[in-house]
Amino acid sequence: MKEESELKNDISATVHKIVVLMRKDSKIPKEQILVLINHLEEFRKFSKGQEVISKRLAYELFYLYTNITSLISYNEDKDISIITELYMVISSVFNDFLYQ
């Protein structure tokens, strides 16, 4: 199992990769989103019992989600199930911090 700091760096790198791919291709990179979802689910194990989430991580996740939702309206692929799953995982990460 990865350490928390290494996992945060992996999440950050994956978010950046997704944003770059979205800007470059104007498509949602589903494979990278699945990687991010796996990282976030693993991160939830560390987040339980903590009182704060880093500003950087919160900003990156919020920025990613808002960019994805913007791209959805222009995307030809209307299958948004992966985006719904991403939303649920991001929400669960934030909920772990809010409701202890």
Image (cartoon, rainbow, N blue to C red):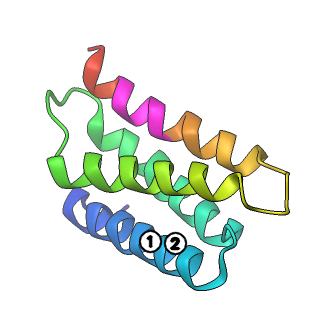
Q: Tell me where residue 24 appears, x and y as whole percent.
A: 57, 85
- Specify whether 13 is left or right of 66: left
Q: Considering depth in this image, is 59 or 57 the residue closer to the camera?
A: 59
Check disc 2 and report the residue beneath it.
18
* Mark identifier at residue 88: none
Q: Which amino acid does label 1 sit on?
A: Thr
Q: Tell me where residue 40 appears, x and y as whole percent.
A: 45, 50
Mark 2 neighbour density, 10 Å: few (under 14) some (14–19) many (20 or more): many
Q: Residue extending furthest front?
A: 74
Helix, strand, or loop for circle 2? helix
Q: Magenta region's main secondary structure?
A: helix
Q: Tell me where residue 11 appears, x and y as whole percent.
A: 37, 63
Q: Tell me where residue 58 appears, x and y as whole percent.
A: 27, 46
Whether residue 38 appears in magenta in the rendering, the answer is no
- Magenta extent: 90-95
Q: Considering depth in this image, is 76 or 8 the residue closer to the camera?
A: 76
In the rendered image, which quarter is residue 72 located in?
Answer: bottom right
Helix, strand, or loop for circle 1? helix
Task: Tell me, yes or no, whether the two marked residues, 2 and 1, touch with CB atoms within 8 Å.
Answer: yes
